[in-house]
Amino acid sequence: METLDQVPSFRRLRAFEAIAASGSVSAAALELRLSQPAVTQSINLLEAQMGARLFERSQEGSFLNESGTIFRRRTKRFFAQVVGAVRSALGDAQREDPELVARKLGGSQTRAIMAIWQAGSFRAAAQKLGLSEPSLQRPARQLERLLGAPLYRRSATGLAVNERGADLARRLALAIGEIISGQEEIGAARTARASLRIGVLALAPRTLLATATHALLQAFPLHKLEVVEGPYQKLAVDLRDGAIDMMYGALRTPPPFDDLCEQDLFEDPYSIVCRRDHPLTKLDRIGAKDLAACQWVFPTEGLPRRVVLNELIEARNLPAHVQIETSCLATIVALLTTSDRISLLSRWQITLDGHADLARVEGVRIPHQRRFVGLTTRSTWLPTPVQDAFLLALQRAAEAVRDASDQSRNAGQSARTGKMAGHGGLGSPPLRSQT
């Protein structure tokens, strides 16, 4: 419930925006229909919350200083996203101007629907916030009346948000993320909050991630990174919800949601892998009969690697008996290093992350669409300087991987007199991976 503790006062933010636009407390008070002392108090409280002055005050007026300029970039994005959230919640039959409705929205209403969305029900949200259910229901129902649309439904766990309510809460959470980023950018981030939250997929090369992490923390030693691993679908949802800032690993072009975008870092094709002293590593040529003599560690059904392996088995007419099926990388490595089993992993998972006990099986072509490792982010995401520094560090680390890949490719072409053996971008169709 961390984000709930950081829901800002909408009144203070509106006062900030009004003064920033007009350069005058009196003009802002007139626009907001508040007294000048009330507007001044809102700004003083906001500056105390930010831990920095936002305006330079003089007889000529109040003008943004460097911190204020940084923060206004975030508040403008915040208000634009709040309006977008309201517009989406109003739907096609909009009886009121979304901007006018958004101006009536307050922090207590936002906190209420976000708490219900995150906790799963009114009852659980009230317990998390330390409130009675009636105290939570008041702002929650006020929001419903403000929008003139149902936001809640009965479920097995009690009263919860419906689809419209969940989308509204998610969009509002992303808007609040702008204010939190603004706090970080002017040096007022809370020490308990990670400056960067990265979702990592199972086969993503960790050495590359570690290299970028070391570079970032050398430049920003007081900041903190949070790295979480999970399956693609869960991390994609977490990314949309703002629970993580980016997802690192194999791209699935196109991403499952329209508001996500992808950036290639390097190509990472699949390879057959085995223990280093496996009988296959001693053969000059490997045929279907050699592969048929081996038992596979199968990826879990539904994973992209399973689809590719199934196609390989069918194309080579190999035995398809499944004895072991797992998506756990540590389990796969343990099974391979203690037996003559073979499996399918990404090339750089072995080469870059340096599993010393494992080897790639050379000379076996694995047809599949080109597979890229990269970053997935929200299309509207505006990274902070710390996040930008990490992106640059990761890109530089990826350049080294691409250079190594080019050298390996050239060496392979020379050794095979220009003939392709195995998939790695050599003569592969220019397709993006669905893996």
Image (cartoon, rainbow, N blue to C red):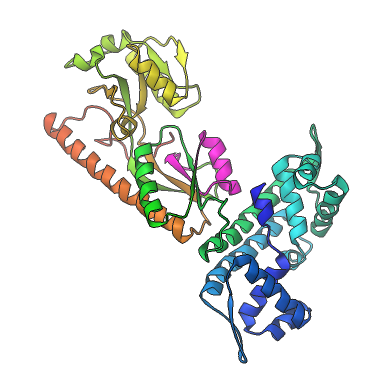
The range drawn in magenta is 227-254
Decide if residue 381 is on the left or right side of residue 368.
Answer: right
> Does any portion of residue 307 appear in the rendered image?
no
Residue sitting at x 68%, y 57%: 7
x and y percent of residue 211 in the render? 34, 45
Residue 212 among magenta residues: no
Decide if residue 402 is on the left or right side of residue 206.
Answer: left
Q: Write down the quadrant of residue 142 in the picture.
A: bottom right
- From what the image shows, is residue 71 above or below residue 174? below
Q: Write down the quadrant of residue 23 in the picture.
A: bottom right
x and y percent of residue 226 in the render? 50, 44
x and y percent of residue 225 in the render? 48, 47
Residue sitting at x 38%, y 22%: 333
> Does any portion of residue 38 appear in the rendered image?
yes
Q: Residue furthest bottom?
A: 59
- From what the image shows, is residue 366 above or below residue 151? above
x and y percent of residue 121 in the render? 77, 40
Decide if residue 70 is on the left or right side of residue 396.
Answer: right
Residue sitting at x 26%, y 46%: 400
- From what the image shows, is residue 296 above or below residue 306? above
Residue closer to the observer: 213 or 305:
213
Residue sitting at x 78%, y 48%: 151
Q: Write down the quadrant of residue 341 in the picture.
A: top left
Image quadrant holding the C terminus, namely: top left
